[in-house]
Amino acid sequence: MKKILIALLVVLVVLQFFQIDKTNPSVDESKDFLKTQNTPQEIASIIKTSCYDCHSNQSNYPLYSYVQPAGWFLKGHIDEGREELNFSTFTDYELKRQDHKLEECIEYIEKDEMPLGSYTLVHREAALTEAQKNILIDYFKSVRTKLNYKE
């Protein structure tokens, strides 16, 4: 039993030498959702707190990202989040995709699927109150109307 525990400890120590890349891609504010939509400060603050760590090029890596394999797990979530929706490159999307992404934002918020529960366990400030959910849903609906996308 002692040998197994020592082997596990050695493996955990060795894993620490394989750190994730914490470099964020550059940000062009002319493509950023909050800037291009002139998002009111109150709403922008909610979106930055609850969405931007995973869905933008402005991720903040917490201390636990230096501990493997937690860092790998975190990096996987960030990469997946950016691939699904990246507010930093929002204007690069075609109008149809912008509209669809906002529709998905509304749906995920209504179903309490975003922000992820695993994220809000560690980042309590990112959990949305009912009032914040309603504010975001109304805002995303208003932006969809402003986009005026017609199929």
Image (tube, rainbow, N blue to C red):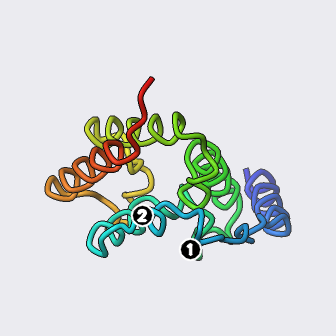
Identify the residue at horizontal 44%, vertical 58% (top origin): 51
Q: Quadrant of residue 70?
A: bottom right
Pinpoint residue 95: horizontal percent, then vertical percent.
Answer: 53, 40
Image position of 22 (left or right of 81): right
Q: Nearer the viewer, residue 106 or 5?
A: 106
Q: Contact, CB < 8 Å: mark 1 with mark 2? A: yes
In the figure, 77 relative to 28: above or below? above
Give the number of marks. 2
Q: Secondary structure at mark 1?
A: loop
Q: Residue at x 52, y 34 (%)?
A: 96
Identify the residue at the far top of this view: 151
Which residue position holds label 1? 62
Mark 1: amino acid: Pro
Residue lying at 36% horizontally and 40% vertically, measured from the top left: 113
Q: Where's residue 29, x and y in %?
A: 58, 72
User: Residue sitting at 60 percent across and 45 percent down?
Assistant: 93
Of residue 72 and residue 6, the one placed in the foreground of this image is 72
Screen quadrant of the C terminus: top left
Q: Earlier in the sequence, mark 1 or mark 2?
A: 1
Q: What percent of the width, then of the height, locates residue 141? A: 28, 44
The disc placed on residue 122 is 2
Q: CA distance from mark 1 to mark 2?
A: 10 Å
Instruction: Write down the quadrant of residue 149 in the picture.
Output: top left
In-front residue for pair 151/58: 151
* Amino acid tagged 2: Val
Crowding around mark 1 (Cα neighbors within 10 Å: few <14, some 14 to 19, many 20+) is few
Residue 78's disc is none
Judge by depth and name the residue closer to the eye, 67 or 1.
Answer: 67
